Image: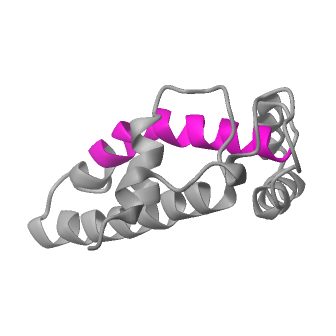
Amino acid sequence: MTWYFEALKRYAEFNGRSRRKEYWFFVLFNVIFVIVLAFLDVLLNLGGDVGLLSSVYSLGVFIPSLSVAFRRLHDVGRSAWWLLIGVIPLIGPIVLLVWMFQDSQAGANQWGPNPKARSRPASAHQPA
C-alpha cells in the first residue's frame, strides 16, 4: 500500500522516473478499489448502468494514473508520448504492457537518476 500512496503523493509530477514496483502496486490497488466500488454500486443501486462510486474514484485517480505511467515510461528510457501507442488496436496495448514490465534503465537517463538507487519510501520502513 505504501507504493500506492507514493504514487498518489506524486500525482502531478510528470517528470522523473517510477520503478516497476510503484507502477504495478498502483495499478493493483486501483483495480481492487474499482472492483469493490463497482460491487458497492450494484449493491446500493447507485448510478444505473454507470456506477457512481467507481466512476468518481476513476475520475479522481485519472491524473495520478497518467503521471505514474509517464514516469514509468521515463524509467525504461522512453518518452511519455509513447503512451499514445495504446490507442492502436491490439498492438499498442501489448507494446505498452511489455514496456511497463521491463526493468529500469541502468544508471541515470534524461529524466533523472535510477529510482532503484534511492531507498524505499519512508513509510515503507515502518511496521504495519
Give the main secondary structure, helix, strand or loop, of the magenta stretch. helix
Q: Is residue 8 visible?
A: yes
State yes or no: residue 58 in magenta. Answer: yes
Q: Nearer the viewer, residue 62 or 49?
A: 62
Residue drawn at x 68%, y 36% is: 70
Q: Nearer the viewer, residue 60 or 68?
A: 68
- Quadrant of residue 61 within the rendered picture: top left
Tell me how many marks there are.
0
Q: Is residue 10 above or below residue 40?
A: above
Q: Is residue 83 above or below residue 36?
A: above
Q: Residue 51: x and y, percent?
A: 27, 55
**Colour mode?**
one colour
Q: Residue 118: x and y, percent?
A: 63, 48
Q: Residue 72: x and y, percent?
A: 70, 45
Q: Is residue 85 above or below residue 117?
A: above
Residue drawn at x 78%, y 28% is: 111
Q: In the drawing, does residue 29 fall left or right of residue 78?
A: left
Q: Is residue 1 visible?
A: no
Which region shows up in magenta? 56-76
Residue drawn at x 25%, y 72% is: 39
**Picture quarter with the N terminus:** bottom left
**Picture quarter with the C terminus:** bottom left
State yes or no: residue 97 in magenta. Answer: no
Q: Is residue 50 above or below residue 1?
A: above
Residue drawn at x 48%, y 32% is: 63
Q: In the drawing, does residue 94 fall left or right of residue 20?
A: right
Q: Residue 7: x and y, percent?
A: 47, 45
Q: Nearer the viewer, residue 127 or 88?
A: 127
